[in-house]
Amino acid sequence: MPSTSYVFNVLANKHAEAMDGYPEPNILERSEKGRKLAEIMTKIIPMQLNLCDFKRTYSRAWWYKLKNGASCYGVFYNPKLRNGSGDICINKIDILNLFWEPGIVDIQDSKFVFLTALVDNDTLKAEYPQYADEISGMNMFDVMTYDDGQNTSQSDIYENKSLVIDCYYKKIRGNKKTVELIKLCNGKILAASEDSGENGIYDHGMYPFVLDVMYPDEDSPVGFGILDVIKSPQLYIDRLDALISRNALISGKSRFLIKDNGGINENELMDISRDVIHVAGSVNEDNIREFQTKPIQPYIINHRQSKINELKEIAGNRDFQQGGTSNGVTAYSAIAALQQAGEKLSRDLIQESYMVYKDIIYMCIELIKQFFTKERSYRVGEGELKEYVNISREMFSGCESSEFDIEISPQKSNPYSRAVQNQTVMDLWKIGVFNPQNKAAAIAMLNCMQIDGRERIIEMINKEAQNTNAENYTAD
């Protein structure tokens, strides 16, 4: 049966819209004492995410979310990174390997959270040499795995691997809630955070997992994806395509009804390269007759198109969102306006990812506060605006992450948004907003606007105003 690619087109379009609105954070203070730290965090958090290769993780998590209904980010601190100095890492977690308490909506409410993984035995023996004799392969639990279609027996898959279970739970230590970790393998406790310190593995008190849900289910921290919604219409369209294609093949081929004793040479008749066909006796409709299948009825073709339109409506993936229009709409601005109006469903889905992004940023701030015992330097900006910003946990003295607000703005990178921003800057320049004498008004206006390179424009205005003041002072 032929298969069309409407589902793939929907998924690719939704993913493109999500990446087109890739988020960037702006961290704001809630009190005067946190202003300087908020400015520093706004500069270094994007750089920290770059070090984690977060944009690639964000992209893959969105593919997972679209197909499966939810994706999961793991926000960890890995002490082995940076040559043993440790660093933050953000990974995409396969939800099939994540387990929580049934009936909850927020994974943070689960009493325990389990993360499973198949780990090579040699790696485990090197990391936990005291249990080397007891690590011999998975023999107690099973875990969801994926194969590449090869005929590989289960024993071959698990022969040199063991199932490692990370058990996360929360504990109250005085007035503080911490997250603890027990690492299990084949019924043995490989490591336990309660044996190694008083602050647990994470002292921010949150499980290091953030779920990004597409369409939520009741009484569950996960949901269902757009693939679950549109796969049935897609299968119906494919069946109609198979019917139409078969009819086209049959009706487009000439066939003949020939009497057994009609005296017609069938081989010569079927050979279209021959100019002469030999027959014995007379030829009439009693001896040979063309058999032609009737073309499929037009209403079936129209019904197929109606089902395609229905799929597009259900998915919110209309033609004008991809640049195609009908009814004579050809103006660039009109097409852009239709696209903006039709993106409300995508914007709704992306807003959920922005809220998840905030939780990730808060976790990153907490990990910096807990683990950055030594000062670290980040390069921020480029060219003349390049600077180096230092951060360490001592700078958080007296400050909590709850004292910061995080605003999320999309990094719109499509040509239309760039053209609009360029035109806005040109219009502001024409009316004299950037004149040095209008410095205060220009900076106030720019701070309220979402324009790429806003900080650079503000710095140039300040620099030009300083030069103008210096020239006036010299003249006097």
Image (tube, rainbow, N blue to C red):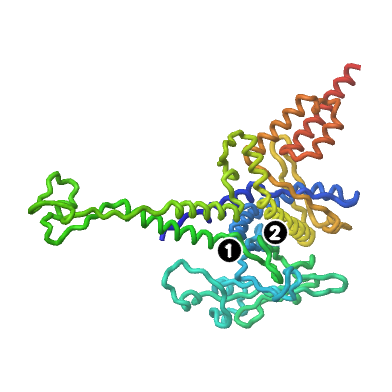
Decide if residue 239 is in sight here. Answer: yes
Per the model, the C-alpha gap separating discs 1 and 2 is 34 Å
Q: Secondary structure at mark 2?
A: strand
Please name whichever residue, 61 or 392, is drawn nearer the observer in this view of the structure.
61
Report crowding for label 1: few under 14, some 14 to 19, many 20 or more residues within 10 A (C-alpha): few
Q: Residue at the spot x=18%, y=58% of the render?
A: 258
* Mark 1 or mark 2, earlier in chain: 2
Percent x, y of residue 434: 79, 28
Picture layout, residue 442 above or below residue 304: above
What residue does disc 2 label? 88
Q: Amino acid at mark 2?
A: Ile
From the viewer's perspective, tell me whether residue 30 is left or right of residue 425. Answer: right
Q: Quadrant of the C terminus?
A: top right
Q: Residue furthest top?
A: 475
Q: Residues within 10 Å of mark 2 (few under 14, many from 20)?
A: many
In the rendered image of this protein, does residue 336 appear above or below residue 103?
above
Q: In the image shown, does 174 or 216 lie closer to the viewer?
A: 216
Instruction: In the rendered structure, find residue 228 and report the number of the disc placed on it.
Output: 1
Query: Which amino acid, mark 1?
Result: Asp
* Badge nearest the viewer, 1 or 2: 1
Question: 237 or 438: nearer the eye?
Answer: 237
